[in-house]
Amino acid sequence: MGRNLLSGIIALVLLLPTLAFAQGRAFTFDATDVDATAALEGKITDYEIVRLDVAGLYAAWNDTPGLLDFDLAGTAGTVSLHLAPWELRTADYQVTLNGDARTPRPTALHSPVYRGNVTGGGEAIVTFDRQFILGHYEVNGRRMALEPLWRLQDGADRDLYVLYDETKAVTGGTDVCETDVSGLVAEKPTGDPTKKSLVGGCLGVDIALVADTELYADFNDVASVENFMLGVLADVRTVYDDEFADEIQYLVTSTTIYTNTNIDPYSNTTNASLLIDDFRVYSSNNPSSIPGDYDVASLWTGRDFIGGTIGIAYVPGICGSGRYNVLENFSSSSIQLRNVWAHELGHNFNCPHDPSGPGAPVHIMFPSVSSVSTWSATSVSIIQDYYASLTCLETCAPPVAAPEKVYTNIAAGTANYFFDETPVTIETRQWTFPGGTPATSTEVAPEVVFEQPGNYVATLTVTNQSGTSTSQVPITVAEEGGMEVLFREDFEDQDLRVSFINPQNDILEWELFTTDGTLGNSSARIDNGTIDRRFTSDFMQSPAIDIDGVEDPKLSLEYAYVRYNFTFRDKMRVSIIQNGVKTEVFFGDELGQGTFATGPDWVGQFGLFLPEDEDDWCFSSPGCIEVDLAPFQGGGDIIVEVENIAGYGQPLFVDNIAVTGIQSLALPVEWLTFAAAPTGKEIGLNWTVNQDAENAGFHVERTDDNQRGWATIGEVAARAGAEENAAYTFSDLTAALGTDYQYRIRQTDLDGTESYSEIRTARLNGAAVAGLSVFPNPTSGNVVLSIPAGDDVPYTLFDATGRSLRQGNFVGGRAELNLTELPAGVYTVRTPVGTTRVVRK
């Protein structure tokens, strides 16, 4: 065994300029007198201490999934950075906590790592985290590093950063690397022999990341641990991109983070050789502890290894049983951490140490850590020969641009929604929308408005290091009758249009989660399967939506759900809230008939249900949710509510909630007046309209506090021909005494188009006949209705949506109903003398 790596530095200069951030805004920061000499001595020989608006930069990243431009202003002048997301993670990337796939954590909705360039300079790479920023950029022939001072000096303000030239990091210390040549199997037995390397090509190496509890303790935040490792790996990739005959791309398939020492499976040894053996044996014997396939795995630790060791790896290891390395978070310098990791991966690629000793040239494979970023000719030759012998590595896939649009025939002036569904990792993305606003975008899911009718073309160009691809999608903006999008939530970024409501204020709540199978990369999830909060409800609600002024208004949403078993199952309710009244329009409860679940029971499966393709969603069976919202028109704005009723079953996923309608054309009537008032023993309705010859007639609709939905109680035919101030009347002879009724008029024209009047309320006062009774209630079959007066009055039975199911008459004050053939639920019986509910078990 043998290995070594990094070292220290001397502080010469302490300057206190400010580091300013801007993205269409100006930021000003005050300098602070900070003495970091003791912390940086022996580590960096020349540097500046600058103050950075970390919260501002993180907020800009969080709000900007596309291009991100900002300025860094220091004593050497202002540097302008132009960045785009650099996705190091595979499409099926997973994060798990404590090695248990039942506790996955949602990944960031866009990459925390951005890459681009500096105006007038070279490459720039920045990693964004709520706790820190890591940056590297090339300017004036120098590669500058930007790192948090608090990683070097305990108690330093979190907005103080060290800015220095990478060559000023001290090299040649006693920190060392070990190697293990224990004769493990060199390559795993599987592999696609057609995947050969090509000179000038690109090879993808799937890498799994693991962090133990000691590394977690360095940050005390799961996302920060993940972003720390991704940020260092981004720098590692810069020394594997053009140093060999083929580019080597490390693509992260999974991240496993241990936060609990009682669950962390690795021994608490500070002997690096023992720890890497623990890592290899546990990972091999427990393959589910590292999700998915991987060619190499790296364990990051916060423990201090004995003997000055800071990293260890098997030689060789890639794709074989020795595909492991272990790394110590020994330094705040990401440059030195980069070289440790690049060094250990070099060992996994069968590369030994470079010669050491007085006068020996220093390269990445030098036994002790350095800040250099070059490989020796010997290392290059060995690594190239080794990867050429492997059959397990795949050539990097060039992108095939896959733009998608949501709506095919959109109305002018309303937003259309586009998605980049390119199936491989890309590095840059550019949309163009000639005639649209915006005209360009780099977002995954842009929203674009075309103000004028016509035919347009959207173009998507995507690039990764294996190539560039461009594809187009046609857009039709209708002259008339196009789709109007009144509301849409696709959960693709943190700027949500819906509100998540957690009445219990507990840990079970809606969250954004990375999924596949629908348009976009993210959905709303609530984790019923991990957290036992049975019989509690959590909600998401839209803002108020105006659905008047369109035809055929619809609510649509997609969901994915499987229950655990009959006992442990969850429910979903969708409701429309209007004027404070909540109306249920969908209720999902999987009882075993496949009417709600989108897949089989999860009992016996490992981990948690996660939709990975369209078959896991509602598209084919049982069908996604679509609700006709026409009954709610004319009654004011609506709020869409999705309710999760926890049953400790499995996670519920919801995506792409939309309220849409068809652009209204000129209607055959213009509503003028509408009134409803009691007259004797009835309620009289009268209305006036301006109408043309296309008016077919009117339907009178009524509801009350005991009635869900609107019921049609009568029809009035239209008078022939066009007419101004056309007056119509209707008498409600079935209104019960003492009940507040709401009325509206639904107008229909000859082609089926409908419009609604406003809503009016009326009450028929007087002495009500008491005593309408139902027995038995609840019932599984027959019920008897009775009224003490013994009148022969009519009754109507309605379901929960307000649909009339049957009608009849009392005979001698008694009526019998057979509900055997009706499904379980709540039904309403309405009579002239009262209204009551019947529960069918």
Image (spheres, rainbow, N blue to C red):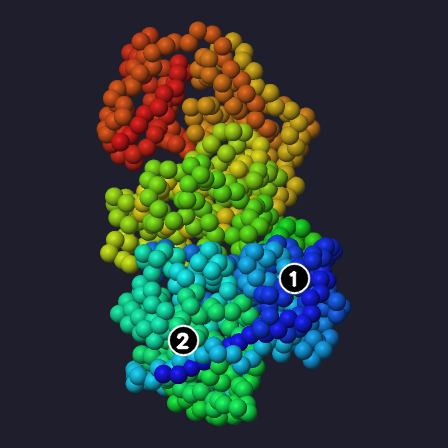
> How far apart are the alpha carbons under marks 2 and 1?
31 Å
Percent position of residue 249, x then y = 49, 78
Percent position of residue 641, x then y = 48, 39
178 relative position to 483: left or right: left
Q: Is residue 407 visible?
A: no
Determine the secondary structure under disc 1.
loop
Q: Amino acid at mark 1?
A: Asp
Closer to us: 814 or 840? 840
Classify residue 362 by image quadrant: bottom right
Residue drawn at the location 32% of the way across and 56% of the way down: 262
Percent position of residue 668, x then y = 63, 37
Quick one: label 2 or label 1, which is nearer the N terminus?
Answer: 1
Residue drawn at the location 62% of the way across and 57% of the way down: 159
Classify residue 119 by image quadrant: bottom right
Q: Which mark is residue 307?
A: 2
135 relative position to 375: left or right: right
- The residue under label 1 is 35
Residue drawn at the location 67% of the way across and 78% of the way down: 142
Q: Which mark is residue 88?
A: none
Classify residue 420 by image quadrant: bottom right
Give the crowd class for mark 2: few <14, some 14-19, many >=20 residues within 10 Å: few
Determine the secondary structure under disc 2.
helix
Residue drawn at the location 48% of the way across and 36% of the way down: 576
Q: How many marks?
A: 2
Q: Amino acid at mark 2?
A: Gly
**What is the residue that sits farthest to the front in this orientation?**
38
